[in-house]
Image (cartoon, rainbow, N blue to C red):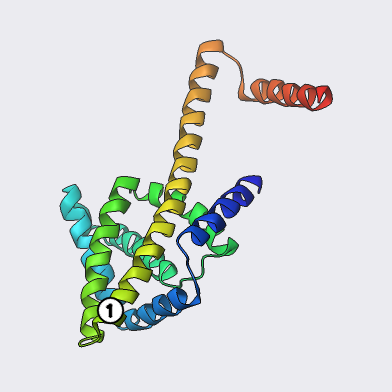
Amino acid sequence: MEGITLVMAWFDKVKTCFAWDKADQARIAELRRWMDSDADEVVENLGQQLVQFKDVQPLMTNVRFVQRLHDVLREWLMDLLGGIFDEAYVKKRWAFGRKLAEIDLSFEDMILLEGLARKQLFELTRARLDGQPHVLSSTMHALDKALNFDMALIYSSYLQVRDAEMERALLERFLSITGFSRTLYESLADAHEWNERNRA
């Protein structure tokens, strides 16, 4: 919980720095409404481009994998376009890192997806706002802010998952070298923590 609080405090500063306001939120909300009729096509295109880039096209014959991939991509995109970057959103994005790990998507893959999604959303927005270049520019500026916020949170989530995996690997190596049981190790760790608290 303390980690979430720290991230939220940092995130509030970021939003202030980028001057995120209700006008930006309204523009993103409008973009999300446009997406309601195009979401399936956008998500499918993103999935196809991603697996082509990663050269894992055979996975697309696995119905279960495709469904999981599309579900994750849809969650990422539609939550992003909700435009409400509050504490609940931060918590969801922290949990999102685990879903990325489950389908073997790295942060580098998310950077690629960000660029691909921005291109598709630009085309969608341009088609809707034909003849309104100022509104198009304002909408894309708001989208850029939202994508930057989101990628910062996903990176934080990704690091959390990666660090937890490294800790587990190091623990397994330590236990195999020392011959300690996991129960003994946890008891020693608890005793050390208790001593540190009492010393303070």
**Near-viewer residue (137 or 45):** 137
Amino acid type shown at disc 1: Leu
Residue 89 position, x and y percent, is 53, 63
Q: Compared to 160, does 180 lie above or below?
A: above
Q: Quadrant of the C terminus?
A: top right
Residue 160 position, x and y percent, is 49, 42
Task: Name the quadrant containing residue 74.
Answer: bottom left
Q: Is residue 179 visible?
A: yes
Picture residue at 44% right of the left edge, 68% below the top: 79
What residue would you read off at disc 1? 136
View extreme (right): residue: 198
Q: Compared to 95, does 84 lie above or below?
A: below
Label 1 crowd (10 A; few <14 / some 14-19 / many >=20): some
Picture residue at 40% right of the left edge, 78% below the top: 27
Q: Compared to 83, does 129 lie above or below?
A: below
View extreme (top): residue: 178
